[in-house]
Image (tube, rainbow, N blue to C red):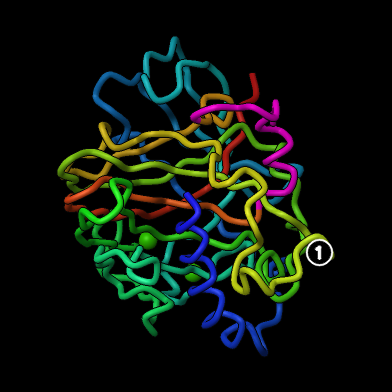
Amino acid sequence: MFTQKFQWIAVSCVLQFALIGCQSDYLDSNVETTEVDSDSTPSNSTASADTETESAFNNGNTDTQTDSNTDDTDPREGTITSYLIDNFDDSDDRNELDGIWITYDDQYDGGNSIVVPTSYYNNGIFYSEAPGYGETGYAFHMSGTTGGVFGWDYLGVFAATGADTICPIVQNPTQDFTQYNGIQFMAKGTTVPSGLHFKLPYKKTGADDNCTHDVLAADSLTNYNDFEYDFGAKITDEWQLIRIPFDEMERGSNPEGLTIEEVLATAKELIWEYQKSNGEVDLWIDDIAFYTISK
Ligand SMILES: [Ca+2]
Ligand SMILES: [Ca+2]
């Protein structure tokens, strides 16, 4: 796992320049809503009805699940309100939390995985592709191949959760994400073999991270043994809703007794990673949002 740190070092070298001049407009921009199309839910899910609602956090979209929910992505009943993180329709490299999007692979680490769009530390530029979910707008499309150098070869993409959650400042996000029940997004694609995870890293803050060892992202406090959720088996070549309850995310081991609540309160990045040697991935994601469930 030591070598994984180098990926962050590499990405950091480039990103610190990109951050110059970037100012937050999150408070003004975070009023987008996302539609969770009931047609996109897995076939075994129950019917749902879309209703607009005002929420305590911002303007959210509500799916009211009207009867017993057999959706295997979320077995609980209740009203689901979503809070947009990005729908990519502005086709830029920032999300609604005012963080930047970054793709990465293990080449800087000495590996030969290749991510498209080209990784930030290979001077790549993040971009979206059309059409997005619903045959409109844009989505993020990541493809690539992983090598066989490490046995844990990888590529991925992450969203910083704020303008200052990565080097050279490394502050906690302005939101406490424990207010949400989970994260959801539309996705389609293929992976051979399966190995897609959504991850939430646990990292140093401020003075605890001098950004000299890792000058892009804060240093890991877990040696990269972070909470994750394997959604690879749910991906097909048709768009569908992936809903990840935070309380179903797990670590490979948990020697420090770290809780998901502690991670969520300070989560500086949201990560979608393909980690499997000699693999091939093609993943589209769109309409990424936090969600809450209320009865
Ligand atoms: Ca979109
Ligand atoms: Ca965007």
In the image, the segment drawn in magenta is 252-267
Q: Residues within 10 Å of mark 1 (few under 14, many from 20)?
A: some
Q: Is residue 193 above or below residue 89?
A: above
Q: Is residue 266 above or below residue 246?
A: below
Residue farthest along the right direction in this orientation: 207
Q: Amino acid at mark 1?
A: Gly
Write down which quadrant ligand 1 falls in. bottom left
The C terminus lies in which quarter of the figure? top right
| Residue designated by label 1 | 206
Q: Is residue 271 above or below residue 197?
A: below
Which residue: 52% across, 60% down? Answer: 5
Which residue: 74% across, 37% down? Answer: 262
Q: Is residue 202 left or right of residue 150?
A: right
Q: Indicate the position of residue 209 as horizontal and vertical percent values.
A: 75, 64
Which residue: 19% across, 59% down? Answer: 145
Quadrant assignment, res 3: bottom left
Helix, strand or loop at disc 1? helix
